Amino acid sequence: MVPIRRLPVPGLSNCRDLGGYAAADGVTRFGVFLRSEAPCGLPEAGGQYLRQWGLGETIDLRGEAEIAWRPSALEGVLPYRKISLSGGAETFEQKNLPQGPFSWDKVYIKRAREHSDWVRDVVTACCEAQTPVLYHCTTGKDRTGIISCCLLGAVGVSREDIAADYCLSMVYLQEMFEGMRTGRLTIRKEPSDFEPYVFETPFTAMAAFYDFFTEEYGGIPAYLRKIGVSDAALARLREKFVEPALS
């Protein structure tokens, strides 16, 4: 396999491999985890590319209404599972948003605190997967960003690299964002007017989210253990996701 960070998958613009980052005692391995926007309306060439790449399963992080409106093109093609946030937490209703001025780190921290069962279930599924995994939400930046932060942080990838990986979504999703702004792409059945922050992935947000784990739990591995991710699952993650760095 040729190591490629951003995969040229037909039909996807934000499909990225988590390989190639410096980690504790090594570097993250290519071909283990992919993150992306939802693979909806994926052309046959897109599915073929992913199968040839070696993808073994997909995890859909979207809510039931999102999935019903825009089904995954990979369901029925590859092993597929849904692990959704509960209680409509993926929506932008006021009850699901933190108090005060909006910032993405507050949203992510609220989800990490109030939906730790969701984080546990997704991270555990990724740790225990026997084949390469693609996990995604709608745009592949927020729910997907939370899980990416946890997986990368669990093996010692730096705050700066995790935040830099998060920032890339704002670059790669410009065509999708334009479709959402103009109404050419409707991500939910209900019409939506999006605030500008919906299209942003600022470095400061992911850096502050990373700092939350450090300040309140002593780091991401400690948070994951606290919420119920087993030591065996974390050991499995390190075994398959980290390879020795060149000496």
Image (cartoon, rainbow, N blue to C red):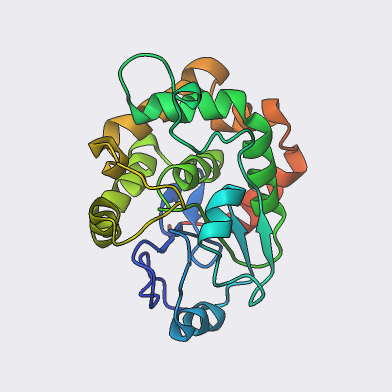
Front residue of this view, candidates 118 and 240? 118
Most extreme residue toward the front is: 190
Q: Position of residue 50 (x, y in %)?
A: 51, 77
Where residue 239 sits, quadrant-wise, is: bottom right
Q: Is residue 160 above or below residue 106?
A: below
Front residue of this view, candidates 7 and 108? 108
Q: Residue at x 36, y 31 (%)?
A: 104
Q: Residue at x 47, y 52 (%)?
A: 189
Q: Quadrant of the C terminus?
A: bottom left
Left or right of 5 in this view: 203? left
Q: Position of residue 175 (x, y in %)?
A: 25, 62
Q: Position of residue 10 (x, y in %)?
A: 38, 78
Front residue of this view, candidates 100 and 26? 100
Q: Position of residue 114 (x, y in %)?
A: 60, 24
Q: Is residue 222 above or below residue 237?
A: above
Q: Is residue 179 above or below residue 118?
A: below
Q: Residue at x 63, y 58 (%)?
A: 240
